[in-house]
Image (tube, rainbow, N blue to C red):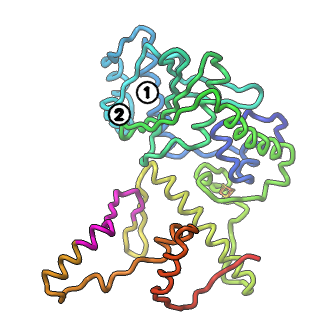
Amino acid sequence: MSVELSIPLLSQSRHERLACPASYVHSEVYGTKSPDNEDSILGNEVHAILFNWAVHNWADKSSVTDQIHLESTLRIASHEAAEIVRHFLDNFSLEFRHIVGLEKHLTGGEDLEGTLDVVLKESRGCYRVIDYKNYHKIIEPTTFQAKLYPLLVFLNYPDATKVDFTLAFTRYGCVRTVSYSRQDMPALMELVEASRARQIQMHENPKQYEKEAVPGKVCIYCPLLRMRECPIEGRNPMEMTPEDRLLWQEYLKRAAKANDAVLKDIALHRDIKAESNGRQLKGGFVLKETKQYPMGQALVLLNDWKNTTDGEDDLIADLHISRSALASKLKAKKRCVLSQAMDDIAEVEQRTEFEITES
Ligand code: SF4
C-alpha cells in the first residue's frame, strides 16, 4: 500500500469523511477510490445543468434567462434531472449582474479549499454564496460547509464585510440562509482549524487511525463498505460471553443511531424500499402533524363540558401532566413551593427497567 505524503487541503467533503478515521485514512491517505452512487450522479448532473444555464452569457444577461439555451441543455439531460431543474427554475432566479463567480474554486492559504456553486456581490461589501442541494429534505444551514464557504469568501475578497450563505433546494425551489459578518471570522477560523488539525494528525500517523471505524452517513461514500473491508464487518453476535453481550448491546445502540442517520441521509435523496418476509418496507420523509391543546383554554372548555353534562362526563379527572413537561420550570428557586406542592400530589408508579450505566 503506497502512502501519499502530501496533505490535501481541507474541504467540505474531506471534513465529512474525517467523521470516520478508517474511511478517511483509506480514501485520502492510501488513495482507495470511493464509489459513485446514483444519487451523487444525479446531483452532479443537476449541478452541471445549473452551471451551464448560469454561465451561458451570464455577463450580458439581464434578469431574463436564456430559455432557448436552457431548453437545448435540458433536451439532452436525463428525464429526472430535467424535471428537477425545470421545477426549480420556476421558483428560483439569479441576479446575473451580481455574479462574481460560478463553480468558483477558492483556497484559504495552505489549508482550505472549496468550490462554490455561485458567488454574488449584491451591494458594497455584501456577498452571497449559493449552494445547490438536491436533497429530499430541507435542512438548516448549520453545517461545516455553511461556515467554511463564508470564511473562504472573507479570505479571498478583502472588501467583504458580510456574507450570506444560502442553501437552494433544487427539488423544492426554496432556500435557507445564514449570515456572517467579518467579526465572525475568528470563530469560523477556530472551527476549521480544529478540523484541519485532526486531518493533519491522520496523514502523519495513518496506522493509528486505519482501524478506527465510526459508522455514520459517511458510510454511503466509503470504499471499505463496498469492498467489505470495514473494520467492524463480520461480528457474530451468537458466540458471546455475557460481558461481550453487554458491549455488543452498547455497540448496537450506537450502530442503530448511526444507521438511522445513514438512512435519513439516503432519504434526503430518495425513498428507500425493501421487502422483508413478504412485507413491503418503505423509508422516507413524510409530513407529520402534532396537535396539542393549550392547558388554560383546554381546562375552561373541559370544565364547561363537565357542567353541560351535569358533572357526568368529567374528562379532567383522568388527565395527567408528566413531571418531565414541567421539570425544567419547577427547578427555578422561586418556584420551590410550587414544586413541593406538585410533588405532594404526584402519583408515583414504580417499575424495573434494564439499564446500562457508566462509571
Ligand atoms: S463503512 Fe466502516 S470504515 Fe467505512 S465509513 Fe462506515 S464505519 Fe467507517
Where residue 68 sits, quadrant-wise, is top left
- Label drawn at residue 88: 2
- Answer with the quadrant where ligand 1 appears in the image: bottom right
Q: Are marks 2 and 1 in contact (CB under 8 Å)?
A: yes
Amino acid type, mark 1: Leu
Q: Is residue 293 magenta?
A: yes
Residue located farthest toward the top when viewing the structure as drawn: 60
Q: Is residue 215 magenta?
A: no
Assign the C terminus to one quadrant of the image.
Answer: bottom right
Residue located at (85% from left, 54% from top): 208
Please identify, in this view, whether the residue under mark 2 or under mark 1 is nearer the observer.
2
Q: The magenta stretch spans which residues?
A: 282-300
Residue located at (42% from left, 16% from top): 96
Residue located at (59% from left, 28% from top): 181
Q: Position of residue 188 (x, y in %)?
A: 67, 36
Give the side of residue 205 with respect to residue 319, left or right.
right
Q: CA distance from mark 2 to mark 1?
A: 10 Å
Amino acid type, mark 2: Phe
SS at badge 2: helix
